[in-house]
């Protein structure tokens, strides 16, 4: 059984009461603590069985997807406690297809304001900044390669809807498909050459909502690691840093262009060891 408990969990439309009725009808109520579909994934059930049998998980230490600056964030904020994460990528490997200005982990500071919409949040200034970035990249020729895949991700669905509407109206997609836009769940199991992440966290957002974003480490892990060559975060740097948690770690990684313990100048034939202690 191969899986990652630090990515997004399964989504079920079955409620606990309905599941309890089904289990009672089938005479398997005693199995619910272990095999509840509502509360447990297949991975959870397999891990529990392994633990009861005296076994243990095997951590897959080698990473082959993301630019070293990008994977430094999950190494520090998500998989902490692991001795090392071996990053088998180098900055040079992306250069042939992807313009170097799009590489790495970059924070674009936007001092915007969050507004409440449908029990969720939108940040118009971040949407404007994303539109400017795409327009500037196109003008500079960075989007000329039609094989370059781009995605835009955000924790809040109304923000994703608003971004998608604005992006589709741009006159940039005559010869290439527009970016895929969605909340983190839309990208689970997927990847793009370049990702833009709109945090939405800014002046006006409720503290609980900001803390939810920073505390949803699995969500941020998925959002960040969908990017192969470049992750461009659009957000209020100060607000995200003050929120703490994983958002603060993401700010720190972007400011340094690498986390503590990540060496620069890695050659094309070497691996990069990222300390997670």
Image: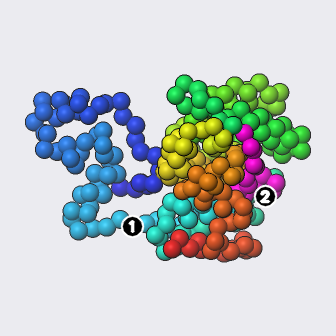
99 or 269: which is nearer to us? 99
Outermost residue, left side: 27
**Badge 1 density bin: few <14, some 14–19, many ≥20, Cα 10 Å:** few
Q: Which residues are magenta?
A: 100-112
4 or 233: which is nearer to us? 233
Q: Residue at x 53, y 71 (%)?
A: 276
**Count the marks: how many?**
2
User: Dividing the picture into quarters, in which one does residue 32 lie?
Assistant: top left
Q: What percent of the width, then of the height, locates residue 61?
A: 50, 68
Q: Is residue 260 above or below residue 188?
A: below
Quadrant that contains the N terminus: bottom left
User: Dividing the picture into quarters, in which one does residue 152 lie?
Assistant: top right
Q: Secondary structure at mark 1?
A: loop
Q: What percent of the width, then of the height, locates residue 64?
A: 59, 61
Residue of label 1:
58
Q: Residue at x 63, y 31 (%)?
A: 115
């Amino acid at each position: 059984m191969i899986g990652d408990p630090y990515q997004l969990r399964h989504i079920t439309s079955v409620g606990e009461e309905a599941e309890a009725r089904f289990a009672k009808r089938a005479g398997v109520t005693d199995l619910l603590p272990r095999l509840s579909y509502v509360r447990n994934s297949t991975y959870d059930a397999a891990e529990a069985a392994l633990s009861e049998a005296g076994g243990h998980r095997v951590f897959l230490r080698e990473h082959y997807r993301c630019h070293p600056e990008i994977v430094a964030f999950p190494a520090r904020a998500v998989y902490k406690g692991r001795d090392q994460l071996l990053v088998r990528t180098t900055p040079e490997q992306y250069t042939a297809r992807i313009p170097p200005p799009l590489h790495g982990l970059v924070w674009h500071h936007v001092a915007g304001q969050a507004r409440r919409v449908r029990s969720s949040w939108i940040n118009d200034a971040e949407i404007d900044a994303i539109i400017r970035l795409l327009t500037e990249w196109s003008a500079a020729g960075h989007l000329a390669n039609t094989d370059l895949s781009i995605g835009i991700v955000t924790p809040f669905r109304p923000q994703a809807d608003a971004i998608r509407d604005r992006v589709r109206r741009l006159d940039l997609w005559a010869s290439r498909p527009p970016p895929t836009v969605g909340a983190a769940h839309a990208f689970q199991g997927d990847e793009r050459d370049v990702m833009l992440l709109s945090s939405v966290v800014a002046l006006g957002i409720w503290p609980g909502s900001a803390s939810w974003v920073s505390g949803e480490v699995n969500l941020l892990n998925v959002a960040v690691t969908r990017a192969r060559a470049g992750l461009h975060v659009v957000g209020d740097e100060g607000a995200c840093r003050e929120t703490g948690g994983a958002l603060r770690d993401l700010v720190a990684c972007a400011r340094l262009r690498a986390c503590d313990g990540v060496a620069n100048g890695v050659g094309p034939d070497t691996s990069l060891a990222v300390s997670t202690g």
